[in-house]
């Protein structure tokens, strides 16, 4: 087989993912492919260049078209014209950790990730009773917390520097995957917090469960003050239909999802990971910075963000 033919064949698996961001609501299989438009964009761009060097113009143009089609689905979401905040506005530092049930032996690395972030708000998903025991030092660092450990995959924990009121565990679309809702009384006013661990997608029913949980977020945050912080494992990328619908209908700022910050699976190199952990914002909040942290033993990487509380 000629090398140029092999390159053309290697483009075929990526082509469906270029359409997926534009048609994710058509079918659950299309929605799953919508997790990978960035990889498709980059791969097809590379193949277009290689085929052009080999003077295979038709497949090169097809790859280029596919790369541009994927770019049209993802790049507009990365464009941010800036907000109204200034450097004098107070900030809140937040950290989201999916701990991974069964990885409690890595508690020292998780504690180091929390210490390194110097976060004011820490949300943990997959908090098992064993994880809670291993993270006992956090109870002294964060005197205000709401903990709902579970031996399965949907335990949650919230650790905050400031007093909490109305901290509660609430249903979120499916009864076995609750969310954690609270109001933190910061020195700069009340801050609503919703920590989530949405069911992972999969074939048919699994996608419907994920989408039901995402749809339940909007009514869940109605009881929070206008300044709202949503964080955790959404098990959805910024290009999945239900995630887009949530952001649009709830009037949320995509926050950390405005850039490509892939967090899962941690074992894969950066270009192959997908962004499913997010920090979303509502009200007079703006994202000042966000970054994906280093591996700490989980299949997810930690996601930290600095959120500006904008003075109107």
Image: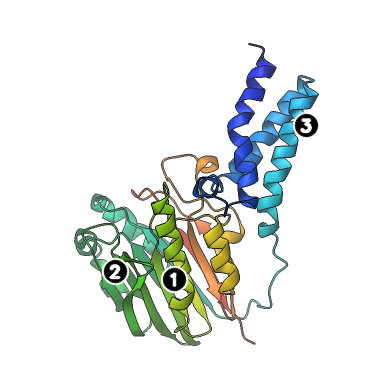
The spot of residue 223 in percent (x, y) is: 44, 84
Task: Please give the residue where the numbered disc 1 appears in the rendered image.
Answer: 216
Report the front residue among 222 and 139. 222
Query: Circle 2 is placed at which residue position?
Result: 138
Residue found at x 78% / y 26%: 58
Quadrant of the image occupied by residue 250: bottom right
Image quadrant where one finds the N terminus: top right
The answer to whether residue 232 shows anywhere in this view is: no
- Label 2 CA crowd tier, 10 Å (few <14, some 14–19, many 20+): some
The mark closer to the camera, 2 or 3, is 3
Where's residue 192, x and y in %?
Answer: 45, 80
Q: Earlier in the sequence, mark 1 or mark 3?
A: 3
Position of residue 167 relative to residue 240, above or below, is below
Residue 10 screen position, x and y as percent: 61, 26
**Residue at 73% across, 43% down:** 68
**Badge 3 element:** helix
- Give the position of the C terminus as an image quadrant: bottom right
The residue identified by callout 3 is: 61
Q: CA distance from mark 2 to mark 1?
A: 30 Å
- Asked if the residue under mark 1 is in contact with the one under mark 2, i.e. CB atoms within 8 Å, the reply is no
310 relative to 71 in the view: left or right: left
């Amino acid at each position: 087989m000629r090398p140029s033919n092999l390159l053309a064949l290697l483009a075929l698996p990526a082509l469906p993912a270029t359409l997926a961001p534009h048609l994710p609501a058509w079918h659950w299989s299309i929605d799953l492919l919508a997790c990978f438009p960035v990889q498709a964009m980059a791969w097809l761009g590379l193949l277009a260049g290689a085929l052009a060097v080999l003077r295979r113009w038709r497949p090169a143009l097809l790859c280029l078209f596919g790369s541009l089609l994927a770019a049209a689905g993802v790049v507009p979401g990365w464009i941010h014209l800036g907000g109204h905040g200034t450097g004098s506005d107070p900030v809140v530092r937040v950290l989201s950790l999916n701990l991974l049930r069964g990885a409690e032996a890595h508690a020292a690395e998780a504690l180091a990730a929390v210490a390194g972030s110097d976060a004011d708000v820490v949300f943990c998903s997959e908090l098992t009773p064993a994880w809670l025991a291993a993270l006992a030092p956090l109870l002294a660092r964060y005197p205000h917390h709401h903990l709902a450990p579970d031996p399965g995959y949907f335990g949650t924990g919230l650790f905050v520097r400031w007093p909490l009121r109305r901290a509660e565990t609430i249903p979120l679309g499916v009864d076995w995957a609750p969310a954690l809702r609270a109001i933190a009384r910061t020195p700069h006013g009340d801050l609503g917090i919703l920590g989530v661990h949405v069911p992972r997608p999969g074939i048919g029913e699994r996608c419907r469960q994920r989408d039901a949980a995402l749809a339940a977020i909007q009514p869940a945050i109605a009881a929070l003050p206008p300044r709202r912080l949503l964080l955790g494992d959404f098990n959805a990328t910024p290009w999945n239909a239900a995630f887009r619908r949530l952001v649009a209908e709830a009037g949320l700022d995509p926050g950390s999802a405005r850039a490509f910050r892939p967090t899962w699976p941690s074992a894969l190199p950066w270009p192959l990971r997908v962004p499913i952990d997010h920090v979303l914002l509502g009200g007079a909040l703006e994202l000042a910075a966000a970054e994906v942290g280093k591996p700490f033993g989980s299949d997810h990487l930690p996601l930290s963000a600095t959120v500006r509380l904008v003075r109107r």
